[in-house]
Amino acid sequence: MLTVDFTRFPLAPGDRVLDLGCGAGRHAFECYRRGAQVVALDQNGEEIREVAKWFAAMKEAGEAPAGATAAAMEGDALNLPFPDESFDVVIISEVMEHIPDDKGVLAEMVRVLKPGGRIAVTVPRYGPEKVCWALSDAYHEVEGGHIRIYKADELLARIREAGLKPYGTHHAHALHSPYWWLKCAFGVDNDKALPVRAYHKLLVWDIMKKPLATRLAEQALNPVMGKSFVAYATKPHLPATAAK
């Protein structure tokens, strides 16, 4: 299940991509399939080891084209172990709402992004997220949980302040908002509640089968109740006089 829309955020074969806070690796895997040179980074060592295993399995199965590379590594988003201007593309999906120093993370992403490079940022959308917080303290009051809720204009302002130029936004995963509302209402750790189990079954069916009816329904509902807000931006080239 991808949050970044690669029709709006195109990759070229050979692009060097950083998936920052990669989690289970869903965006890193897609970039690898598209021929990129991918680095998946996360502070969770257990998840990174799993991502590395999947990269190896994908290579063995021939899922990535010739020239594509993939590496998984532990790291700190506030102190990235890469030189300046190392990447053509940076993706940070559902991460910034966890990090107290979000401006510091943006600064690091800008530092390692090449001039003319592209960045995709996704965070939980304000409205659906507010409902979750209202229904359940346990949803966000956990170690490493969500510490803020972004309004779209606030996130875009931070992106601009970091020196990036936004060029597009959209919402995603409308069908997932009710699932999380149910989880919060019945208990975030209560997977046995019938409404939660039934809706989870629907989501799994939708992800696996991708039926036209639910695809059209989600497309129509995303502007109203999409679970995620997605922003795309570029790092401007310095003027010739400033670059000297």
Image: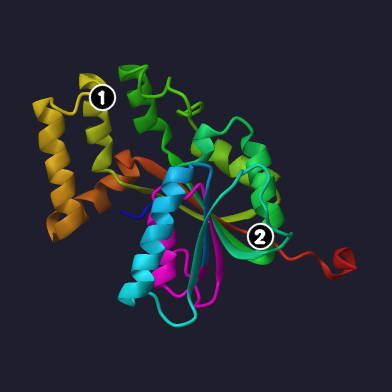
> How far across and down, in percent of the image, does residue 202 sit?
13, 44
Task: Please tell me whether mark 2 or mark 1 is closer to you in this view.
Answer: 1
Nearer to us in this view, 75 or 111? 75
**Type of residue at label 1?**
Asp
Q: Examine the rendered structure and indicate whether residue 191 appears above or below residue 96.
A: above
Residue 189 is marked as 1
Snapshot quadrant of residue 194: top left
**What span is in magenta?**
8-37
Q: Which amino acid does label 2 sit on?
A: Leu
* Left or right of 180 on screen, residue 171: right
Q: Position of residue 97 (x, y in %)?
A: 50, 34
Residue at 36 percent across and 60 percent down: it is 54
Q: Does the magenta stretch include residue 52?
A: no
Q: Would residue 59 appear left or right of 214 to someone viewing this image?
A: right
Q: Are marks 2 and 1 in contact (CB under 8 Å)?
A: no
Q: Which of marks 2 and 1 is nearer the N terminus?
A: 2
Indicate the secondary structure of the residue bearing disc 1.
loop
Q: In this view, does 53 lie above or below 135?
A: below
Q: Mark 2 sits on what residue?
A: 113
Q: Residue sitting at 71 percent across and 63 percent down?
A: 85
Q: Does the magenta stretch include residue 10?
A: yes
Categorize mark 1 by other alpha carbons within 10 Å: few (<14), some (14-19), many (20+).
few
Left/right placement of residue 97 relative to residue 87 reads left
Numbered badge on residue 44: none
Residue at coordinates 50% horizontally, 26% vertically from top-left?
147
